[in-house]
Amino acid sequence: MCENCGCANTTGHIHLHTHHNHSPNREIQVHEAILAKNDHLAVHLREKHHRQGILTLNFLSSPGSGKTSLIERTLVDLADQFSMAVVVGDLETDNDAQRLRGKGASVVQITTGNVCHLEANMIETALADINLEGVQLLFIENVGNLVCPAAYDLGEDLRVGLLSATEGEDKPLKYPTLFKTADVVVLNKMDIAEAVGFDRELAVENIQKIAPQATILELSARSRLGLENWYHYLQERYQTLASQTLIEVK
């Protein structure tokens, strides 16, 4: 997987699963060991966050689907209801983190270089720079990529997959792993769906075929279309976490 997209050839301060043995069996063993270590840490993070009363969401999508816009709108609109924090992942720049700062939430940037996904150890390191006391919702904006990020558990409670109307209806069929692992699929930019010729019914059919377990929400972060359903979903899921962990909800 990753040897083809470049993230196995990392340099600099992040050294993730670099290896030079080209035996297929050896590569599989190394990759499996990395995922096992990642999954163990992810379980630890999830349990730790539950003890702190934090619901964690991992946002995955292709670049430009609207992850940052949706998170930004959520920070502003739910500021009076939740204490929130954000971890942003990008190959380069901290543009998205700068955009989200000043919205009432703690924000930390992870710059991965040429690593095309986030991993649990990156999240653990980044969260050391955030005061999580009192935080209720933690948003992780993953690197824009429909392939590799889907393989890594980051300790999230909910995996949010975004598909924008400008991307086409067949993305769930072309990139099934992301959608198969999603708890909720957000169809974003639906305010321009008709203008760009997006077939809403076909998109929903494809999502349901690949990811029957996923809740489907149709909205537009820019125009606010359908945002109330997204906020209701977050409120319900936090209430569920609170009831399971005996957290007192405000």
Image (cartoon, rainbow, N blue to C red):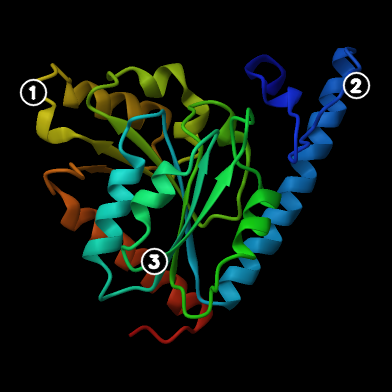
Q: Is residue 12 left or right of residue 144?
A: right
Measure the alpha-carbon separation of dots 3 and 2: 43 Å
Q: Is residue 223 left or right of residue 49?
A: left
Q: Is residue 41 above or below residue 13?
A: below
Hey, which quadrant is residue 208 in on the image? top left
Residue under numbered circle 1: 194
Q: Quadrant of the C terminus?
A: bottom left
Q: Give, as a three-letter code, the residue at label 1.
A: Glu
Q: Quadrant of the N terminus?
A: top right
Residue under numbered circle 3: 105
Say whether disc 3 or disc 2 marks the residue closer to the N-terminus: 2
Secondary element at tag 3: loop
Q: Any mark on residue 26, and which?
A: 2
Hey, which quadrant is residue 165 in on the image? top left
Say whether disc 2 or disc 1 marks the residue closer to the N-terminus: 2
Q: Is residue 91 above or below residue 58?
A: above
Q: Residue at x 28, y 75 (%)?
A: 81
Secondary element at tag 1: loop
Q: Give, as a three-letter code, the residue at label 2.
A: Arg
Q: Any mark on residue 207, and which?
A: none
Q: Residue at x 39, y 66 (%)?
A: 105
Measure the alpha-carbon separation of dots 1 and 3: 34 Å
Q: Nearer the viewer, residue 109 or 117?
A: 109
Answer few, some or many: residues within 10 Å of disc 1's Cα (few below 14, many 20 plus, some between 14 and 19).
few
Q: Position of residue 117 (x, y in %)?
A: 59, 35
